[in-house]
Amino acid sequence: MSSRGLYRGIFSALIDDEDFQALSPIARHTFLTLRLCAQNTAASIFRCYPAVLAVQTGYDLETIEDALSELQRGTWIERERLIVWLRITRRTCGSENACPFF
């Protein structure tokens, strides 16, 4: 692995997705940080420490917890204690043809 970390791509259509745009700016930033962070795995299921996420985003812990709750309500993520699963869907993967999980 290079000093730049692993490459993690996202489809540019995500930014213009209506559901993504309906999220608060903090939830969008938090989701993108979760998607791109070094802790994320190929399956997008990983241990996520809110304190680390707070440092990565610059938000306080209460703000991070609110953003994670918003993302979970919107079915962007699933969360059980410290385990986070970024739900892989057409909106985060791009399309059925581009996404290996469909």
Image (tube, rainbow, N blue to C red):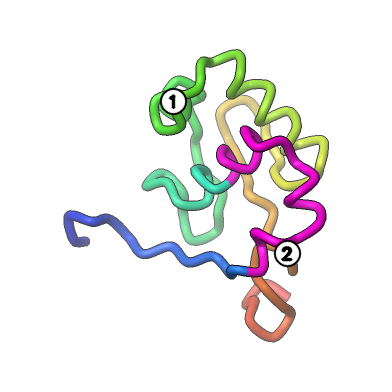
Q: Name the kind of residue labelled 1 in the image.
A: Gly
Q: Quadrant of residue 52?
A: top left
Q: Which mark is residue 91?
A: 2
| Magenta run includes residue 14 | yes
In front of the other: 39 or 25: 25
**Residue 29: percent from left, percent from top:** 56, 40
Farthest bottom residue in view: 97
| Magenta run includes residue 78 | no
Residue 38 in the figure: left or right of residue 99: left
Please report the bounds of the magenta region as a residue range.
13-31
Label 1 Cα crowd, 10 Å radius (few <14 / some 14-19 / many 20+):
few
Residue at x 55% of width, y 58% of height: 43
Q: Quadrant of residue 15?
A: bottom right
101 versus 8 height, above or below? below
Quarter of the image with the C terminus in it: bottom right
Which residue is the site of mark 1? 58
87 versus 79 height, above or below? below
